[in-house]
Amino acid sequence: MTHRERVLAALRHEEPDRVPIDLGGTLASTIVGSAYPRLREALGLAGHEAKTTWTYASLAEIEEDVRQALDLDIVHAPRAAGAGASARQLGPDRFIDEWSVQWHKPEGGHYYVEHAPFEEEATVAAVERHPWPEPKDLVNLDGFGEWLRRMRRETDYAISLEIRGRVMSMGQFLRGFENWMMDLADNHAFVEALLEQTTRIQMAINATVLAEAGDLVDIIYTSDDLGSQNGTLCSPATFRKLFRPCFAKIWEQARRSSPACLAHHCCGSIRPLIGEMVELGVQVLNPIQVSAADMDPAELKKQFGRELAFWGGVDTGYVMPRGSVEEVRSEVRRRIREMGLGGGYLCAAVHNIQPEVPPANILAMFEEAKAFGRYPIGQ
């Protein structure tokens, strides 16, 4: 099978020749830039610094020689939505983004919110006064369509595309994490006003991107974290009242505008919300954070496996950074047994591979996925 045929078969809940494997198919299933040169060297490729794809997380752009060496099945389309002309650099590790959020990266760390524009005033009037960005300024289609057509013509990879779909995290960034959690409890007028604006802008961005993408992509995905290690960040009732209407609009637009499969990235313990996502049209869930409470992959497969495909699941909390090569191989076999039977599984790490993960463990993950992931599984 071709890479694309393999992925599409798995997403249709059919058994392809082997379980598809991914590194870089989403912005949450790749590798950070500082870990990338060592991976290249472990593959016998020329080592060099990574070209980063996303400023906030310093993620590496996966190159074609790495895709070929690992026999990866998915390639990520260029980011067409992101920081626009309104973003301002304040220094090498500090900037203000297109939403007026100020970010800072400490040495050796990731970017975090240093100043949120609504941290002092969380009112409907403040939302109405805020200088919201113009959607057209947040889209960059230069070379985007040409890249898609070339990859479709010259390669057999399945193509994934990120679209905007943040709901919970927009409030966290614009208001500040702690304040936003309090607002979800007792400041619903502000929450609804802010989400109305941010959802409107994101959908306008998506309309432009999806129109340009047409039928050239195989997977479109959104990202928004709704879980912690031990439970959801909000109650199901709060999700239904405040967040579900926004997700419904974003995902309905995506399903209506593209024939591609709709995936959503959502970290943490989110089992009480998975059924809601399925009802709203989500067809693939990533990253399956197996270390989080109530996220047992076998149980998820049993409960949701007919409607939902699973993407990820190889533990990055302990096994990938601290386990032996054989522990990594055992972890991969376990996840394939739990989620791969009957199709519906794309093998990848739980979120992005960090610098402390030994290159030998990364290679072991992909080698075992290709060897053990041959259908019929375990034979």
Image (cartoon, rainbow, N blue to C red):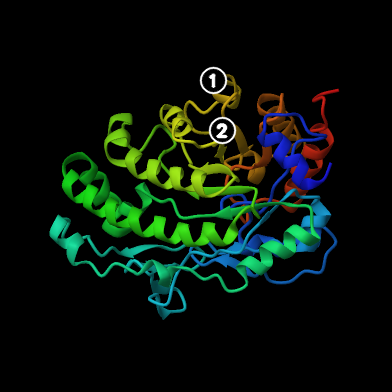
Q: Nearer the viewer, residue 119 or 104?
A: 119
User: Where is 13 relative to 180, above or below?
Assistant: above
Residue plotted at (41% across, 73% down):
94
- The quadrant the C terminus occupies is top right
Q: Residues within 10 Å of mark 2 (few under 14, many from 20)?
A: many
Q: Amino acid at mark 1?
A: Gln
Q: Quadrant of residue 330?
A: top right
Give the image location of residue 70, x and y in percent: 80, 51
According to the picture, the residue beneath numbered tag 2 turns out to be 290
Q: Is residue 120 visible?
A: no
Please give the residue where the numbered disc 1 appears in the rendered image.
303
Q: Give the residue type at disc 2.
A: Val
Q: Residue at x 34, y 56 (%)?
A: 200
Q: Give neighbour class at mark 1: few <14, some 14-19, many 20+ (Cα, 10 Å).
A: few
Q: Residue at x 31, y 33 (%)?
A: 240
The foreground one among 172 and 76 is 76
At which x and y percent is residue 223? 48, 49
To which quarter of the image does residue 232 belong?
top left
Cα separation between marks 2 and 1? 15 Å
Residue at image x 47%, y 78%? 92
226 up-or-down from 118: above or below: above
Q: Is residue 305 left or right of residue 175?
A: right
Label 2 residue SS: loop
In the rendered structure, the answer to whether residue 307 lies left or right of residue 360 reads: left
114 sits left or right of 121 in the view: right
Asked whether residue 340 appears in the rendered view, the answer is yes
Quadrant holding the N terminus: top right
Q: Position of residue 113 (x, y in %)?
A: 36, 62
